[in-house]
Amino acid sequence: MTILALTGPSIDGGLYTWFQQQAQTSPAWFDDLISWYASYGLGLYALMMIWCWWRARQARDPRAMAMALFVPVAVVAAYVVNDIVKSMFTEVRPCQAIAGEITLQPCPGVGDWSFPSNHSAIAAAAAAAIWLISRRLGIIASLLALVMAFSRVWVGAHYPHDVIVGLVVGAVVGALVELLARRFAPPLVVRLQGGALRPLLTA
């Protein structure tokens, strides 16, 4: 059910247009790099998740393994929550709402709502979850989440407010899921370590 159909141009349409103007005058290599990251950068978080799992396996700590295993759960939960918010606000993509804009990437289709940004929410959820596992890796993940948010505006897919709210939604959901996993999931890991999955859960 739609609560409010946001009108993005009245919120920060001018700032969005400024970003598009900068993108059109920037070096091609920079635009290509940002465009690539906007499309495929989330894959870096999969590598971080594998690192967290491997580190937890070597540590032989059920709590560490529980937290590592629940990073993907945090990401999926953030995506679901963010998508529910999208369906409630139904904000039209800026590349559809603002006539004459030239964007680096093709405009998503009608009905693919803009607010909040799924990419930003996913990146922030992963970063928040990883932060609670490793502060050092979490800093890297958080910086990459900010770059993801920037990239989604740069290529023309989102308004700035879309990515900001996406970051907030993702960070809150990601941290909440990870804190719950740290509190309640270790006993499950201990039980699984006694079965066929033991080689995957402990060194």
Image (cartoon, helix red, strand yellow):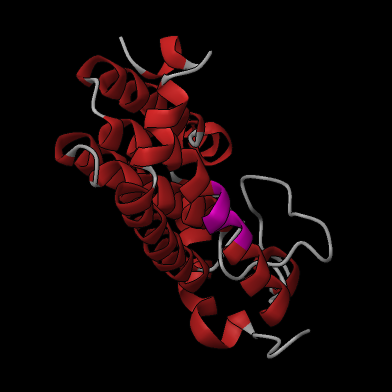
Q: Quadrant of the N terminus?
A: bottom right
Q: Is residue 66 above or below residue 164?
A: above
- Residue 140, given in percent of the width and then of the height, sits at 24, 38
Q: Is residue 124 above or below residue 84?
A: above
Q: Which residue corresponds to the image point at 71% horizontal and 67% vertical from the top-left? A: 113
Q: Is residue 62 left or right of residue 87?
A: left
Q: Is residue 89 left or right of residue 63?
A: right
Q: Which residue corresponds to the image point at 15% horizontal and 36% vertical from the top-left? A: 136
Magenta stretch prevailing secondary structure: helix
Query: Which of the two residues, 1 or 203, is positioned nearer the viewer here?
Result: 203
Query: Which of the two residues, 114 or 106, is positioned nearer the viewer here?
Result: 114
- What's the magenta region? 76-80
- Residue 155, given in percent of the width and then of the height, sits at 56, 49
190 drawn magenta: no
Query: Which of the two residues, 5 or 85, is positioned nearer the viewer here?
Result: 85
Query: Which of the two residues, 92 or 174, is positioned nearer the viewer here?
Result: 174
Q: Is residue 127 left or right of residue 158?
A: left
78 drawn magenta: yes
Residue 27 seen in render: no
Q: Which residue corresponds to the image point at 60% horizontal and 81% vertical from the top-left? A: 9
Q: Is residue 185 above or below residue 170?
A: above
Q: Quadrant of the C terminus?
A: top left
Residue 60 placement: quadrant: top left
Residue 96 placement: quadrant: bottom right
Q: Is residue 40 above or below residue 117?
A: above
- Residue 67, given in percent of the width and then of the height, sits at 34, 40
